[in-house]
Image: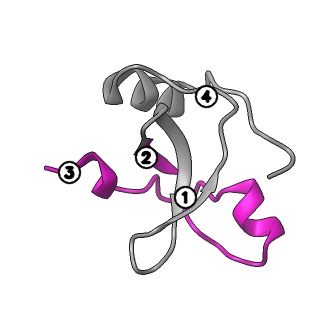
Amino acid sequence: MSVDRAPPQEGKLGFLAQAAGQAFALQVCHSRAGFYIGTRDDEGLPFSRESAEYWGTEGEAAAALAGGAWTQRREP
């Protein structure tokens, strides 16, 4: 399973994605910097990085998303 295809969190939309006129669900994403909470577009491409934090593992990022223990970025 690729972490880039982690299932989105139903009903939880990305603030920055919404500010850009899109309704994409929050999910755990991955970049060279680490794991983060973000959104992906309908084609599965990264759209927004919503969290200020990066985590070292997918599990840590997933736990932060599930528990609300993360900081929402307010600007891209």
Magenta-colored stretch includes residue 10: yes
Q: Find disc 4 in the rendering and name its residue.
A: 68
Q: Find disc 3 in the rendering and name its residue.
A: 2
Helix, strand or loop status at disc 1: strand
Q: Residue 31 carries which label?
A: none
Q: Distance between the residues labelled 1 and 3?
A: 15 Å
Q: Distance between the residues labelled 2 and 4?
A: 16 Å
Name the residue at 51% across, 37% down.
36
Magenta-colored stretch includes residue 5: yes
Badge 2 amino acid: Cys
Boundaries of the magenta span: 1-30
Badge 4 amino acid: Gly
The reply to whether callout 2 and callout 4 are in contact (CB within 8 Å) is: no
Q: Find disc 1 in the rendering and name its residue.
A: 39
User: Could you tell whether 67 is left or right of 43 in the image?
Assistant: right
Q: Distance between the residues labelled 2 and 1?
A: 8 Å
Name the residue at 77% across, 78% down.
21
Magenta stretch mostly in which secondary structure? loop
Name the residue at 76% across, 67% down.
18
